[in-house]
Image (cartoon, rainbow, N blue to C red):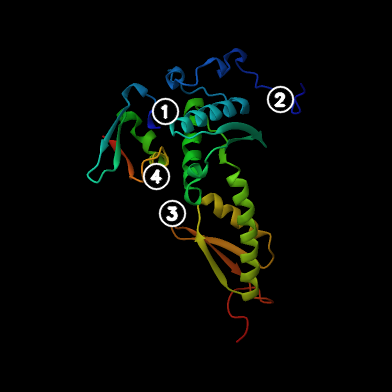
């Protein structure tokens, strides 16, 4: 076996890895030793996240495979197989809830902030690509017309994807307007040849 | 589902009580009670945690489209 990353565990208390604990009983971790947190390794975050999501979907009566991978310094817990529509929900709402609860559960267990996301059947990855395409085409359209285009409500994560995609289109900008949960992105096209908004011609 | 999740979220799992009751219109209501110190942990900033728990409760099992509610009892 070769480890491509040559991962160095942090040099604190080597003998106290979490692997000995039972995943099923959070009480074993809820001891009085709060504070004094040394950041958990990504491997620990991954294993804790995988354990939580496995238990959660089982408790929800959903069959699926759960794996956790480490990507660019953060952990992605992926659920696949079976009927995953229920885990995604309308416009990804259930997936957002799953991620929120998972991240919170892992942070409370490890007593540290963690970088962790949850995906179901690569929904996030697919949604990202289609949102980016959509953002670019809206930016082009706003540019051609020199107007603003209001997009449908999106959550913060999706709005960020839109802003990032619009930002690389010359002559278009974007901003958000309204309050959650109906906060939405406005894509603004600069009029051709004139720097500011406003009518292009009198 | 709540039986599994809630102990992960609180400091005092001993104090968790979850009661399932039926509402007037046949909806399922989970009454959730935790240590008063843990109340904020279950609700979360701006209610984010309790809202997420409600969403997950609705996605749990086949409830024949009966609404599922999660209420926090003081």
Q: Is residue A109 left or right of residue A141?
A: left
Are tags 4 and 3 found on a single chain? no
Front label number (4 vs 3): 3
Q: Is residue B10 above or below residue A72?
A: above
Q: Marks 3 and 1: CB-CB under 8 Å?
A: no
> Mark 2 — residue?
A7
Percent x, y for residue A65?
Answer: 57, 32
Q: How far separated are the C-alphas under marks 4 and 1?
A: 23 Å
Q: Quadrant of the N terminus of chain A?
A: top right
Label annotation for residue B4:
1
Q: Marks 4 and 1: CB-CB under 8 Å?
A: no
Please tell me which of labels 3 and 2 falls first in the chain. 2
Percent x, y for residue A76?
Answer: 60, 36
Q: How far separated are the C-alphas under marks 3 and 1?
A: 28 Å
Front label number (1 vs 2): 1
What residue do we see at 47% from left, 58% from top?
A: A183
> Mark 4 — residue?
B46
Q: How far separated are the C-alphas under marks 4 and 2?
A: 38 Å
Please tell me which of labels 4 and 1 falls first in the chain. 1
Q: Secondary structure at mark 1?
A: helix
Label annotation for residue A41:
none
Label annotation for residue A181:
3
Percent x, y for residue A82?
Answer: 54, 38
Quarter of image, res A16: top right
Parent chain of label 1? B
């Amino acid at each position: 076996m070769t480890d491509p990353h040559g991962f160095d565990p942090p040099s604190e208390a080597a003998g106290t890895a979490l692997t000995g604990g039972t995943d099923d009983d959070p009480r074993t971790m809820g001891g009085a030793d709060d504070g004094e947190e040394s950041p958990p390794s990504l491997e620990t975050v991954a294993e804790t996240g995988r354990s939580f999501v496995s238990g959660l979907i089982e408790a929800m009566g959903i069959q699926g495979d759960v794996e956790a991978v480490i990507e660019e310094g953060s952990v992605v817990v992926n659920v696949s197989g079976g009927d995953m529509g229920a885990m995604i929900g309308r416009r990804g709402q259930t997936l957002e809830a799953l991620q929120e609860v998972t991240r919170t559960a892992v942070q409370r267990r490890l007593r540290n902030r963690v970088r962790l996301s949850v995906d179901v059947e690569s929904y996030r990855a697919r949604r990202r690509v289609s949102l980016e395409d959509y953002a670019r085409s809206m930016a082009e359209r706003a540019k051609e017309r020199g107007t603003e285009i209001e997009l449908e409500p999106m959550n913060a994560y999706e709005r960020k994807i839109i802003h990032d995609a619009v930002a690389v289109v010359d002559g278009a900008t974007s901003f958000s307007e309204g309050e959650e949960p109906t906060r939405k992105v406005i894509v603004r096209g600069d009029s051709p040849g004139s720097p500011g908004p406003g009518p292009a011609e009198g | 589902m709540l039986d599994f999740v809630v102990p992960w979220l609180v400091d005092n799992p001993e104090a968790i009580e979850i009661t399932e009751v039926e509402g007037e219109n046949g909806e399922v209501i989970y009454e959730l009670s935790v240590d008063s110190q843990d109340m904020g942990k279950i609700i979360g900033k701006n209610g984010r945690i309790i809202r997420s728990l409600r969403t997950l409760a609705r996605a749990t099992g086949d409830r024949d489209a009966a609404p599922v509610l999660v209420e926090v009892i003081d």
